[in-house]
Amino acid sequence: MSYQIISDSSCDLGAALAAEKQITVVPFYVAFDEESYKKEIEEMGIRDFYQQMVDNPTVFPKSSMPSVQDYADVFTPVIERGEAVLCLCISSKFSGSLQSAITARDMLLEKYPEAQITVMDTMVNTVLQGIFVLEAVRLRDAGIPYEEAVARLEKVRDTGRIFFTVGSIDYLQHGGRIGKVAGAAVSVLGIKPLITLKEGEIFSSGVARGRKKSLDKVISLLKAYLEENHADIRDYSICIGYGYDYEEAQAFQAQVKSELASEFGDFDLPLFQIGATIAVHTGPYPLGVAIVKRT
């Protein structure tokens, strides 16, 4: 049975790539005030979003999850043309997007009891969610049947990791993603936090003084993960996730490839821009590496 891959816009694949890979994206909403919520990408471009953050550093934007109706509107035409739905949502520990999709699924199954609708908690987010979704695309395009694709994705999702740092602790602190006491200490000392996303949520992975040392430590975290898992990086899907500063991301990309070249040779390491859904928590200068085992 043919199936349509759907994801919320936390996947950060961008409109052009999503269209090329035939991925349907259900947008989050983002606002810089209490009322003017706009659909990410569709109504507020990512570059414009970052520019507003940079120009207004004391304003903390907010995001809102897709509604049940947003998902129902996307699922319905897929069902009506006789295809299955494979919906890959941001970690449920970060957002209620998954619950909106589940409610839409249950509502539609009452009307279309023969429909096949899988809603998966990917346990990841942002560019890691993006490369996980691209793994689903690879399975679909290779002719892997629907049920097998779901099983293979479920098997590898807990291998996903993001190792990253941010330019300022303020956004994480404001959004409640880091304790106020820890945030105040980091701000006073000028220290940059190291953060790991695993098992669907974020964890502290230490600190570093200054941007360069924090990025060096991000690479060390990646190396430690590969060593711990006796992993060949070529068996994994990996990318750089960045925010406002594309040139910094390019330099970091070159550094990662250089430091791993002696062991792994050349490997693909694309750059993906972190979107508004996650950037409301990280601020305009997140930078790091996402990795997940290939299915």
Image: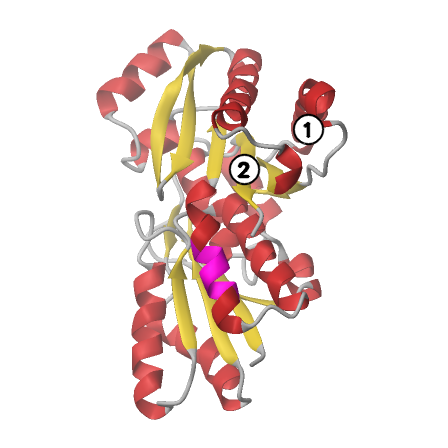
Quarter of the image with the N terminus is: bottom right
Q: Residue tagged by mark 2?
A: 290
**Most frequent secondary structure within the magenta stretch:** helix
Does dot 2 land on a helix, a strand or a loop?
strand
* Residue lying furthest right: 266
161 sits to left or right of 203? right
Residue drawn 50% across and 38% down?
A: 53
Q: How was the colour assigned to the protein in this rendering?
A: secondary structure
Residue type beneath disc 1: Gln
In reply to whether residue 152 is colored magenta, the answer given is: yes
Residue type beneath disc 2: Ala
- Residue 94 image position (x, y, % from top left): 33, 47
32 sits to left or right of 127? left
The residue range painted magenta reads 149-154
Cα distance in 3D space between marks 2 and 1: 12 Å
- Residue 30 image position (x, y, % from top left): 43, 53
Q: Is residue 30 above or below residue 174?
A: below
Labelled disc at residue 150: none
